[in-house]
Amino acid sequence: MEEDLLSITVWLAGRGYRLRIKPEEESAVRKAVKLADEKVNEMKQHYAGKDDQDFIAMSLLTYAADNATESFNSPVMQEELNKMSRKIDTVLSACTE
């Protein structure tokens, strides 16, 4: 059985997109679209001579790169890397004795 989905139209870079989402996700989706649209507008101010598709792609790449690097800075990731480093050091020390 398909759950009830809400049909909404969101606007990004002046273009409407129809989405079907869970009703409880509407606020988060609208907020994400607003942030994306703001990022596209920011790109338009910094880079001339591009079309909207270029700005959307540039915004997406910026978002993806930011998220990829943030995961390496998390305390959990740092602790795991430290554990691995200690294990490597232990093995290397045992090999040199």
Image (cartoon, helix red, strand yellow):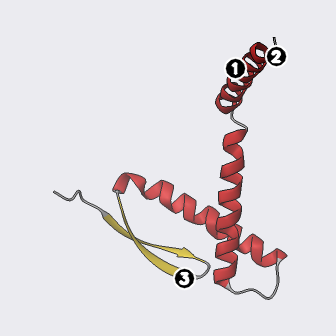
Q: Position of residue 89 (x, y in %)?
A: 77, 20
| Residue at the farthest top position | 97
Identify the residue at image location x=72%, y=48%.
69
Q: Residues within 10 Å of mark 2 (few under 14, many from 20)?
A: few
- Toward the viewer: 37 or 63? 63
Q: Position of residue 95 (x, y in %)?
A: 76, 17
Does residue 8 appear left or right of residue 45 in this picture? left
Which residue position is annotated with label 2?
Answer: 96
Q: Position of residue 83 (x, y in %)?
A: 68, 22
C-beta proximity under 8 Å, tags 2 and 1: no
Q: Amino acid at mark 1?
A: Lys
User: Which one is in front in this view, the residue at disc 3 or the one at disc 2?
Assistant: 2
Which residue position is annotated with label 3?
Answer: 15
Which residue position is annotated with label 1?
Answer: 87
- Toward the viewer: 73 or 26? 73
Q: Amino acid at mark 2?
A: Thr
Does residue 44 appear left or right of residue 32 in this picture? right
Whether 76 is drawn above or below 55: the answer is above
Q: Residues under labels 3 and 1: Cα distance?
A: 53 Å
Q: Residues under labels 3 and 2: Cα distance?
A: 64 Å
The image quarter containing residue 52 is bottom right
Q: Earlier in the sequence, mark 2 or mark 1?
A: 1
Whether 89 is drawn above or below 65: the answer is above
Q: Earlier in the sequence, mark 3 or mark 2?
A: 3
Q: Secondary structure at mark 3?
A: strand
- Toward the viewer: 47 or 91? 91
Q: Residues within 10 Å of mark 3 (few under 14, many from 20)?
A: few
Whether 70 is drawn above or below 81: the answer is below
Image quadrant holding the C terminus, namely top right
Identify the residue at image location x=79%, y=15%.
93
